[in-house]
Image: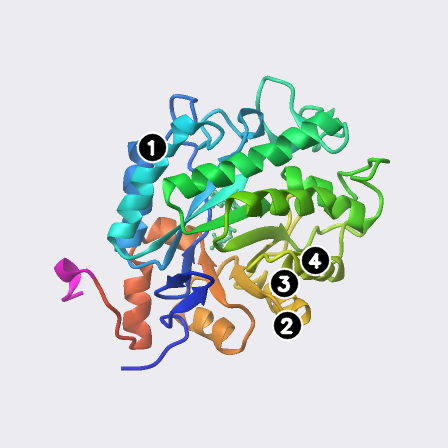
Amino acid sequence: MTQTKLFSPYTIKNVTLKNRIVMSPMCMYSSYNRDGKVTDWHRVHYPSRAAGQVGLIMLEATAVAPEGRISYQDLGIWSDEHIEGLQEIVRLIHHHEAKAAIQLAHAGRKAELEETIIAPSAIPFPGMKTPKEASKDDIAHIVASFKDGARRAKEAGFDIIEIHGAHGYLISEFLSPLANKRSDEYGGSADNRYRLLREIIEAVKTEWSGPIFVRVSANEYHEEGNSLEQYIQFAAHMKEQGVDLIDCSSGGIVPASIDVYPGYQVNLADRIRNEAGIATGAVGLISSSLQAEEILGNGRADLIFIGRELLRNPYWPLNAAKELGAEIERPQPYHRA
Ligand code: FNR
């Protein structure tokens, strides 16, 4: 049996993942009652991937405030009433020796809701509703919502929190000069644009001592957007604040045609990891075990996030282990697989 990178354990703070495979956060829009609560869809969907031997299951973008939902069917963590359902999902994931993470999110100007939506500036995402410029009170409320979300995530038993700072949602809007035209201390310079994320990380840390990941869009696909060099700087700030890993995605801030190909975002994870000196996750069209092994073996990322491939095949890790000749623990009923 071969020693592989993909099936080697990974320890972050108090959490050890049994392998480097992460289920990338993916919105299911399946809280059918518009109350943000867990439904039978989630009860089957997430634990299936845990049974398939994914090391870390990350729940989808979960709204820290009702006005921060992308749609009315989003999963939510804005009320204590959400804790019980999430606790059940964590228990089912843990049953398979996988760890559980939750992505805390606020949609900002990309919320498709009837009520007033908020963003750093009153500039719509092209084709969408015009948001209200967030007041200082709104900003304080946003920071408090992430803090309360972290407390609830802890009560629900999650192992890891990821803050959603990517794809043109609220935090990403504050970071980007393309969406943030504020003239106060939350806009203008890169340090000012980083201020909201800085405050959110500090607020989360008051409730949460476990691992913290942050997902960013490290390529904004626009000349006037933040450069990768700027994201390397932001990553260095996050490292100073105690963030454990940067999950490196791209796009979503403004419409752009993106040239996609296998591993198209891996260079972002590679540069941030090796220039900011912080662990990274690589994501985006990673679908083969050899591709994953190459990324880890060459020191380009620490974890491999897999999205659509895991929607097609919840048992992807079992096949990957077979392909790589890796011996893995598997649930007794599957021991012949
Ligand atoms: C996504 N993606 C995503 N990203 C994120 O940070 N939070 C989210 O809730 C979602 N939701 C979502 C839903 C669906 C159906 C898809 C397909 C994607 C992006 C996802 O996590 C991943 O970064 C991309 O899909 C690229 O990876 P793959 O799919 O090529 O492995």
Location of residue 326 in the rendering, given as x and y in whole percent from the top left corner: 29, 75
Residue type, mark 3 in image:
Leu
Residue shown at 33%/32% (left/top)?
84
Disc 4 residue crowd, few under 14, some 14–19, many 20+, Cα 10 Å: some
Residue at label 4? 237
Marks 2 & 3, CB-CB < 8 Å contact: no
Helix or strand or loop: what does disc 1 sit on? helix
Residue at label 2? 274
Cα separation, mark 3 vs mark 1, equals: 37 Å
Cα separation, mark 2 vs mark 3, equals: 10 Å
Q: Which callout, 3 or 1, points to the residue nearer the camera?
A: 1
Say if the magenta span includes residue 21.
no
Helix or strand or loop: what does disc 2 sit on? helix
Q: Which mark is residue 268?
A: 3
Q: Which mark is residue 240?
A: none
Residue at label 1? 84
Residue shown at 25%/54% (left/top)?
96
